[in-house]
Image (cartoon, rainbow, N blue to C red):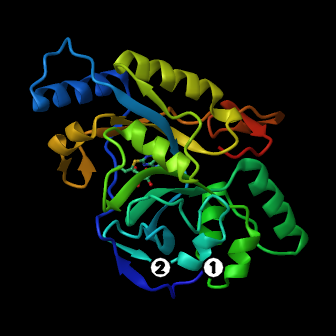
Amino acid sequence: PSKNFKKVKHKTAMLSLGNAFSEEDLINFEKKILNFLNIKSEYNIEFSAEPKIDGISASLFYKDGKFVQGLSRGDGQVGEDITENLKTLRDVPITLPKGVPDIVEIRGEVYMAHDDFETLNRQQSDKGRKTFANPRNAAAGSLRQLDTKITASRPLKFFAYTWGEMSEMPGDTQSEMMACFDAWGFTVNPDFKVCENVDALNKHWQDIEERRSMLGYDIDGMVYKIDRLDWQSRLGFVSRAPRWAIAHKFPAEKAITKLLDIDIQVGRTGALTPVAKLKKVTV
Ligand code: IVH
């Protein structure tokens, strides 16, 4: 991994998200929105919902339909120029179809799928090289290589989920924007969905939580965004996070492993404490 990438200021900052850990947090999130927009509480606000990918965020800048610059998030204000490395990803189109706005900046997450991560680690250890602790580290290390050939040999993927600068807005809602990104050749998460109210968000959250270990890549929650873009604009930001979006986190991941042995530790007073020896498992 290299520290030698050129630093570039983001034209619009790459923000973070507030967190919700319970249904109560979510109800409060909606209440604040209704208050801010001065909307009656009976009114249902539509939200988009999609998995929160545990990867590395990146921004892809297109001018006249050509990919010209790719940046890492960095501190959100200034990122690193990783254009050449991002060009090696299959999910990053080099040219966009005719008719797209002159300036398009797509933002999303670079990640490594579980099976690709395992294959990479096997190859690394066969070659006597360092293995990676988890798919996120593998994605980060693979993206920050000065030798583009190394990045090209790594199985990195990209989900588009938001945008930065756009010379023209091709949609009025989050879901219309995602449909455009999909039509332009980007990969949008297949579990992206518009939900008609908070109950529907919770249902989708539960469904994904149940399927979490089968998705094939790491996620740590769901991200909800108000679907209407005019409402997103009215709500704006507080410190570094939008008022119109939130990350609904999953409880700590559970895993099943094997009990290999039980040691009995003898304390000073003679108390016996059984200690489980577990087969190593990464969560
Ligand atoms: S939306 C203004 N959607 O989570 C909101 N972020 O904790 C922009 N992330 O820095 C972010 N999956 O790197 C959004 N589906 C998703 C996401 C997502 C992962 C990351 C992103 C962001 C961080 C915030």
Query: Helix or strand or loop: what does disc 1 sit on?
Result: loop
Q: Is residue 36 above or below residue 220?
A: above
Mark 2 neighbour class, 10 Å CA radius: few under 14, some 14 to 19, many 20 or more: many
Mark 2 or mark 1, earlier in chain: 2
- Measured from the top left, where is residue 196 in percent x and y? 37, 19
Q: Which kind of residue does numbered mark 1 sit on?
A: Gln
Left or right: where does residue 33 sit relative to residue 210?
A: left
Percent x, y of residue 266: 71, 38
Q: Give the residue at x 64% y 28%.
A: 211
- Tell me the quadrant of the picture where the N terminus can be found: bottom right
Label 1 sits on residue: 145
Q: Please tell me in which quadrant of the rendered image residue 78 appears.
A: bottom left
* Vertical placement of residue 25 versus 105, above or below: above
Please state which amino acid type lies under the numbered disc 2: Asp
- The number of numbered badges drawn on the structure is 2
| Residue occupied by mark 2 | 81
Towards the viewer: 259 or 42: 42
